[in-house]
Amino acid sequence: MFSIRMNSVFTFFLLSVPGAACWAQMPAKMGADSAAIKQCVAAWDDAWNRHDARATAMAYVEDGDFSSTTGVPSHGWKELELHYNDIFTTFLKDAHRTDTVRSIRFLTPEIAAVDIDWQMTGAKTRDGKDVPTRKGLLNWVVTKQHNRQWMITIYHESAF
Amino acid sequence: MISTQTRIVIVALLFFTFSAAGSRAQMATNRETDTAAIKQSVASFADTWNSHDAHGVAMRYAEDGDFSSVKAEPSHGRKELEDHYNTIFTTFLKNAHTTDTVRSIRFLAPDLASVDIDWLVTDPAAPGGVLRKGLLNWIMSKRNGQWMIVIYHEQAF
């Protein structure tokens, strides 16, 4: 009788410990992934502020999607690089941006939606007139790659 | 003369080839069905919005759905969402009508999709009849066979 009870207790213990460990590990993993996502945003912001069109585009997955404040799309590395090259050599050539992560929502362990407050100084209109400080919200979908790096899959931006 | 071993290998190869082709065909069919279901869900949302039914609109979201306005003011969960829609339907959007047209759908997983929607909000009292226009970006998730809004962003331009 005693040994049957002990066996049950032992079995329960064996089943519970890995479950609890798994639960304990999830927030830790999520914390690590949140930090990695913030790092991805910071690296992108840095590439943007260096006006490096190629590096900015390479923060996206190869078939990444961008949509501008007026809903104009760019798809894939080639179009993305052309888009960034265009803005960095024209109306945003003296612009500087600040991006602050507002929230991260994990949709799956490898897919997250990220809201980012953005602010920009030094922007001009297409015909060269100064623009007051711009601000708004970026909403990105980022995905975790095989090398554990988080990359932009979908980028939307709004200005207000 | 074909040996038994060779026959087994050929049969196995044929089996896997047809299984893979069948699986791809099934995936394409599922995607078409899901695309149609997502478009139907967007249309239902617009209908409910146009009848200014705050509860009905909030119920188009997942229980822990997130909304963000054109000024990035958030609402989270069905209660806050219903309160938000109740406010707009009884104040500055009480005579408004929305037209939502799906621009693109990108599947992130079989039960998860990002949907871009061109939107136009009209009001007879607005200059030129147009109150707002822009783009909605939704993240939708298939829950119990139904596509629900998990995250809603809107941008006006």
Image (tube, coloured by chain):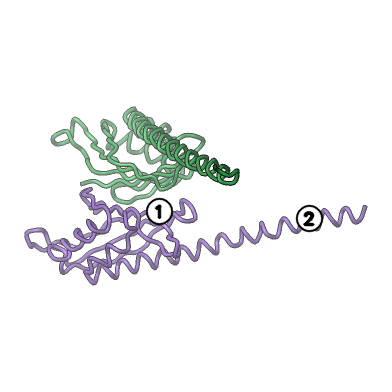
Chain colours: A purple, B green
Q: Hey, which quadrant is residue A141 in on the image?
A: bottom left
What is the secondary structure assignment of the residue under circle 2? helix
Whether residue A64 is visible here, answered yes or no, is yes
* Upstream in sequence: badge 2 or badge 1: 2
Residue where numbered disc 1 is placed: A113
Whether residue B78 is visible here, answered yes or no, is no
Q: Residue placed at 21% from the left, 38% from the top?
A: B131
Q: Nearer the viewer, residue A122 or A44?
A: A44
Examine the rendered structure and indicate whether residue A150 appears above or below residue B76. below
Q: Chain of mark 2?
A: A
* Image position of A149 (left or right of B122): right
Residue B141: image location, x then y, percent: 44, 42
Q: Hey, which quadrant is residue A42 in on the image?
A: bottom left
Examine the rendered structure and indicate whether residue B108 appears above or below residue A131. above
**Label 2, residues with CA under 10 Å away: few <14, some 14-19, many ≥20:** few
Q: Nearer the viewer, residue A7 or A77?
A: A77
Residue, far front: B1
In front of the other: label 2 or label 1?
2
Examine the rendered structure and indicate whether residue A60 appears above or below residue B113. below
Residue A36: image location, x then y, percent: 43, 66
Q: Residue placed at 54% from the left, 40% from the top?
A: B11
**Label 1, residues with CA under 10 Å away: few <14, some 14-19, many ≥20:** many
Residue where numbered disc 2 is placed: A11
Labels 2 and 1 within one chain: yes
Residue B8: image location, x then y, percent: 58, 43
User: The disc labelled 1 sits on which kind of residue?
Assistant: Ala
Q: Residue placed at 28% from the left, 66% from the top?
A: A98
User: The disc labelled 2 sits on which kind of residue?
Assistant: Thr
Residue A69: image location, x then y, percent: 22, 52
